[in-house]
């Protein structure tokens, strides 16, 4: 009998969470707000959302700490991209901290997409920083799926996706 998945949200597991996005140029604040709220429904938005106007481009930083990331993790499970998530979330893991990005435009379509390193996707990104002494174990738990019983995975193992985004081939 399958056991129910543990519902993680980061906040209740001792993870320090920082979420940030930058609005620049012609970024539509309402679309940015929708993309953030799709992934992080409890992200506190500014009370007044001012859009860019002719001669006055957007130039704002929205950021918040300790926003639960349970909805984001649920979407990873629903979309069955847990190994990709482990690779993307662990790519910049240094000690007890990792930083990763999520494409805002994909979030508008209720999808999670991790941009390739060095690329800035159309529509901008949401940057997530996670910090905890047990972060590696937490990332493994947050992205765990039954397939890992037969094909174990760890951060930056030989099965990790290549730096150009290509899948690793393994037998």
Image (cartoon, rainbow, N blue to C red):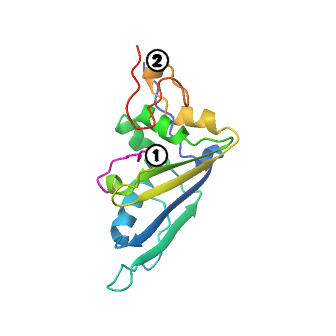
Q: Percent x, y for residue 23?
A: 43, 69
Which residue is identified by label 2?
151
Rendered residue at 57%/43% (across/down): 92
Q: Which mark is residue 170?
A: none
Q: Percent x, y for residue 169?
A: 39, 21
- 20 left or right of 120? right
Task: Kindly check if marks 1 and 2 are in contact, taking CB atoms under 8 A apart as contact.
Answer: no
49 in relation to 94, above or below: below
Asked if the stretch drawn in magenta spans residue 113, the answer is yes
Which residue is identified by label 1?
117
Q: Percent x, y for residue 16?
A: 64, 51
Viewer-nearest of discs 1 and 2: 1
Asked if the stretch drawn in magenta spans residue 93, the answer is no
Residue 154 falls in image quadrant: top right
Which quadrant, please, contains the C terminus? top left
- 42 left or right of 66? left
Residue span colored magenta: 108-116
Query: Rounded to the nearest whole Å, what is the CA distance between mark 1 and mark 2?
Result: 26 Å
Please, which residue is most extreme toward the right here? 133
Rendered residue at 67%/37% (across/down): 134
- 44 left or right of 78? right
Front residue of 107 and 58? 58
Q: Percent x, y for residue 116?
A: 42, 45
Rendered residue at 68%/42% (across/down): 96
């Amino acid at each position: 009998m399958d056991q129910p998945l543990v519902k993680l949200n980061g906040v209740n597991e001792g993870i320090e969470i920082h979420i940030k996005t930058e609005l620049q140029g012609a970024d539509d604040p309402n679309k940015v707000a929708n993309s953030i709220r799709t992934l992080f429904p409890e992200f506190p938005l500014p009370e007044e959302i001012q859009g860019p106007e002719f001669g006055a481009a957007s130039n704002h930083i929205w950021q918040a700490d300790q926003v639960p990331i349970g909805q984001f993790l649920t979407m990873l499970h629903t979309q069955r991209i847990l190994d990709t998530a482990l690779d993307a979330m662990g790519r910049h893991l240094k000690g007890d901290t990792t930083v990763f990005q999520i494409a805002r435009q994909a979030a508008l379509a209720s999808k999670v997409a991790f941009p390739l390193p060095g690329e800035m996707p159309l529509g901008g990104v949401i940057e997530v920083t996670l910090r905890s002494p047990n972060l590696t174990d937490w990332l493994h738990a947050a992205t765990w799926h039954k397939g890992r019983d037969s094909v174990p995975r760890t951060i930056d193992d030989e099965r990790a996706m290549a730096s150009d985004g290509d899948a690793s081939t393994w037998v």
